[in-house]
Every structure is written in C-alpha cells, then in structure tokens.
Image (cartoon, rainbow, N blue to C red):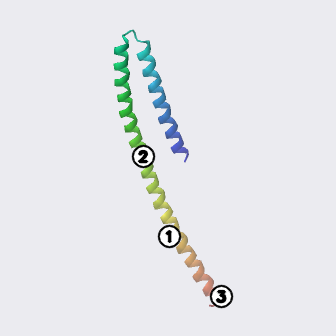
C-alpha cells in the first residue's frame, strides 16, 4: 500500500509542477493575450494527454498488483487447507477415530 501512495504522490507532484511551471512561463512571457490563450490551450491539451498516459500506466500497474495478490492469496489458501487436512488426519490417527 505504501508503494501505491508513493506513486500517487509522485504523479500528483509531477502534474502540479508541470501545470504551475507552464502557467508561470506562459503568463510571464511578453506576448499578446491572444497568443497567450493559444499557448495555454495548447499546453492544456498536451498536459491532458500526458495525464491520460500516466493514468493508464498507473491503472495497468494497479491491475498487475491486484492479480499478483489474488494469486498469492489463492496459494496461501490452498496451503492452509492442505495443512488443516493434514492436522485433522493426524489428530484422527492419534485419537483413534
């Protein structure tokens, strides 16, 4: 769970930093309002695409982790059942049932 929070925090930080840097650069540049709006629109579209890319990547990684956890839990469940059966058989032999 710590890895998920760390990845989310990193992604959030990257996005906020990119937006703040782009906005500051565009707003402080000496150009007309029309040019600034055009650049802001273009930068917003670029950031949207980048966010979608990172979002899809994060989603794929989350699905992979979920699948791995499900497989490990199924393995542990099978081992516990086998151990419980072995213990029951051993108890039945010792008790003479």
Above/below status of 12 relative to 95: above
Q: Nearer the viewer, mark 3 or mark 2?
A: 2
Q: Which residue in the protein does label 3 denote?
A: 95
Left/right placement of residue 63 relative to residue 6 reads: left
Q: Which residue in the protein does label 2 denote?
A: 59
Above/below status of 15 relative to 90: above
Along the polypeptide, which appears first: circle 1 or circle 3? 1
State the image quarter where residue 18 is shown. top left
Residue 78's tag is: 1
- Separation of residues labelled 1 and 3 (CA atoms): 26 Å
- Separation of residues labelled 3 and 2 (CA atoms): 53 Å
Looking at the image, which residue is at 38% across and 27% down?
A: 44
Above/below status of 73 relative to 3: below
Q: Are marks 3 and 2 in contact (CB under 8 Å)?
A: no
Left/right placement of residue 88 relative to residue 64 reads: right
Q: Are marks 1 and 3 in contact (CB under 8 Å)?
A: no
Q: Position of residue 31 (x, y in %)?
A: 37, 10
Q: Position of residue 55 (x, y in %)?
A: 41, 40
Along the polypeptide, which appears first: circle 3 or circle 2? 2
Left/right placement of residue 2 relative to residue 35 reads: right
Looking at the image, which residue is at 45% across and 26% down?
A: 19
Dot 2 crowding, Cα within 10 Å, few <14, some 14–19, many 20+: few
Above/below status of 83 relative to 49: below
- Separation of residues labelled 2 and 1 (CA atoms): 29 Å
Looking at the image, which residue is at 52% across and 37% down?
A: 9
Q: Image quadrant for the C terminus?
A: bottom right
Residue 60's tag is: none
Element type at marker 3?
Answer: helix
In depth, the one of 58 and 27 nearer the eye is: 27
Q: Position of residue 11 (x, y in %)?
A: 47, 35
Dot 3 crowding, Cα within 10 Å, few <14, some 14–19, many 20+: few
């Amino acid at each position: 769970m710590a890895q998920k929070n760390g990845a989310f925090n990193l992604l959030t930080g990257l996005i906020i930093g990119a937006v703040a840097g782009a906005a500051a650069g565009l707003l402080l540049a000496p150009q007309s309002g029309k040019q600034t709006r055009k650049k802001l629109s273009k930068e917003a579209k670029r950031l949207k695409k980048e966010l979608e890319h990172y979002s899809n990547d994060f989603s794929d990684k989350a699905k992979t982790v979920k699948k791995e956890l499900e497989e490990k839990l199924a393995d542990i469940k099978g081992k516990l059942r086998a151990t419980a059966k072995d213990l029951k058989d051993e108890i039945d032999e010792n008790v003479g049932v």
